Amino acid sequence: MKESCLPSWERELLDAPIVDVHEHHIPTIFLSNRVHLLDLFRHSYAAWTLRRPYPLPSEHEREDSSEPVMESFGWEHLSPYLDQRGSNSFVRNLSRGILAIHGVEDAKEIHQGNWEALNARVIQSHLQKGFQANILKRANITRVITDDYTDPLLDARTCFGSGYYSVMRINAFALGWHPDSKDHNGNSAMQLLDRAGLHPETFEDYLEALGFLTRQMKNRGQLALKNALAYDRSISFSAPNLDLARRAWGKRNPAETEKLAFGDYIADHFCKLAAEIDVPIQMHLGTALIRGSHPMHVAGLVERNPGTRFLLMHLAYPWSRDLLAMAFVYRNIWIDLTWSWLLSPSHFESALHEAIEILPDEGRMMLGGDNWHIEETFGTMQTFRQLLLKTFHEKVVSGYFSERDALRLGHRILHENAQSFFAHA
Ligand SMILES: [Zn+2]
């Protein structure tokens, strides 16, 4: 349907502002002025169809995520994405975003006949200063919270400007028993603390240093803590056991039970710090180290910390129903829909139907892009608006709620909920 034929509430939501609560806009990637078409695929979820960027516990070596810089490339480098994986949702979303921004002659697909013209436009656009900011404006994304996992202490305002904020990732700290221990992104707790002028010698010093770093978050424009430990270990966080956690301290290779107890203790410690200064904790749930990433694993942590606000991510794909039931039971849970519609748009539609029905109030849902380049973010937000409208339309047509309800809830999901959720920070 043409936009002009849509009911007014749908047109309004197609253009409503978005507060984007989760991106991986990393200054060296997002703002680079040397980007070509293949780079957009290699720094996107489309690349995850070729290779997981994180190792499984059975894979002892850290996977090398660095890729050779390619000055020139051919169709044979794009065809693994577009010919062999063209039906995958990540590939489709990214292709739509690229075509919406750089499209030539109303092309619906990227193919052997148009990729060179598209590539030339991509290169040219990224050379222009302010290109990314202009596309954000076109998508009507008014604020962005970015998770730069290459620098958990990033002050995003210094590189991206005043509309940007960041999160402080806690993964390295939950694995920080020894100066050599690192998270799956290669971050070391001791190096991060060293940068902040903190040099803990005992476990108790370490806990105090983490408190100091957390209380400084506002100075760095950091609005939330981010727990992405589902990529490093099971998220089955046991009740804190100080003695067992302390036993890992200073050891290069602690026993597995000691490592887990260390991480459990730190995860809980951050929950208490977050409650103390009233910043939320954003947490990855669902597909990652998949044997240990079921949302029910974090029920204990959520229940032990009723004063902490948890923003639980990705509709815990594929366990959305379990997460929604948890959000009905525990009223300190909010839902970050980010990534879920990229994994599977059709699953997202059915989960959104249920989320509307079961969540205890309309202030619970928000969204983010979860992307590296502006083309993917643009495609992701376009896809979101379409899926939101389709689902709301079905709710209106079935008589579940009215157009007025749809409009009110739409504004809440797109921007109002995030504004009030992060207002205290
Ligand atoms: Zn993410």
Image: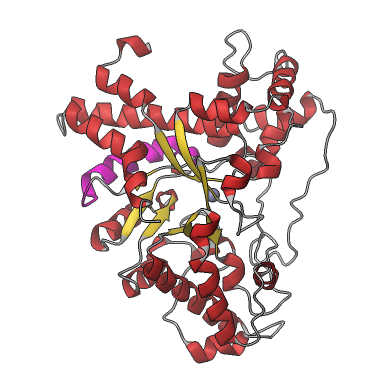
Q: Residue at x 39, y 40 (%)?
A: 348
Left or right relative to 242: residue 423: left
Whether residue 1 is visible to the viewer of this picture, yes or no, is no
At x 62%, y 36%, the residue is 373
Picture coordinates of residue 201, whole percent (x, y): 66, 86
Residue at position x 16%, y 29% from top? 402
Nearer to me, 155 or 127: 155
Height in image: 317 above or below 207? Answer: above
Q: Where is residue 249, by image quadrant?
A: bottom right
Per the rendered image, the range of residues in magenta is: 341-361
Q: Residue at x 64, y 68 (%)?
A: 196
Q: Position of residue 185 (x, y in %)?
A: 67, 59
From what the image shows, is residue 180 above or below residue 347? below
Residue at the front extreme, as displayed: 219
Question: Magenta residues: mostly which secondary structure?
Answer: helix
Q: Position of residue 229 (x, y in %)?
A: 54, 64
| Figure coloring | secondary structure
Q: Which quadrant, please, contains the C terminus?
A: bottom left
